[in-house]
Image (spheres, rainbow, N blue to C red):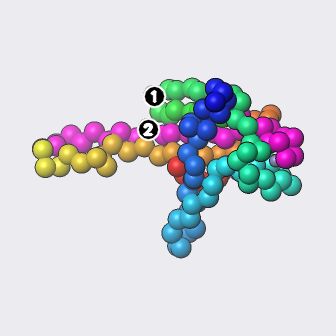
Amino acid sequence: MSDNENLWYEIPSTAWISLARRGMESISLAQCFLKNCDNEDIDLLEPFKKEESDDNKKHIKKIHIKCKKCGGIFQLKFETIKRVAKPKNMNKDEVEDDQVLSIGLVYALDEENNNLGHIGYF
Ligand SMILES: [Zn+2]
């Protein structure tokens, strides 16, 4: 297995899209997000580069992926927004996992960093 194949471990297999009042639906991220391409074959997608940046508000990870069907390159951008709640008056019973919140957003970008759209949440 090459290093590039390991990049799939950096990519959640699905994202969640909000369907307004009808709840959430999962979609596969193993597909080509470029216009006019319907590639959903993971074997025809090749992640080849990862970029990461971090500040105190969010963590951004971009995975560059080449589509072997249309020959194009796109990026999946994962943005984790840190919202760590720090309650002032806390006793033991009130400490719950959901007081530490973070939100993950996933976007598709083309090769030139043009936004192809907000895909959903991860
Ligand atoms: Zn494609």
Q: Kindly identify which numbered label has been placed on residue 65.
A: none
Residue 34 in the image: state x and y as whole percent.
Answer: 80, 48
In the image, 122 versus 40, the foreground residue is 40
Read off the residue under disc 2: 82
Read off the residue under disc 1: 56
Q: Is residue 98 left or right of residue 108?
A: left
Q: What amino acid type is highlighted by mark number 1?
A: Asn
Was residue 85 drawn as part of the magenta stretch in this picture? yes
Magenta stretch, residue numbers: 64-90
Query: Label 2 neighbourhood size at 10 Å, few (<14), some (14-19), many (20+)?
Result: some
**C-beta proximity under 8 Å, tags 1 and 2:** yes
Instruction: Tell me if residue 53 comes above or below residue 31 in the rendering.
Output: above
Tell me, yes or no, if residue 50 can be seen here: no
Q: What amino acid type is highlighted by mark number 2?
A: Lys
Classify mark 1: helix, strand or loop: loop
In the image, 14 versus 84, the foreground residue is 14
Q: Which residue lies at the image location 51% right of the left edge and 45% below the top edge?
A: 104
Q: For the N terminus, which image quadrant?
A: top right
Query: Label 1 neighbourhood size at 10 Å, few (<14), some (14-19), many (20+)?
Result: few
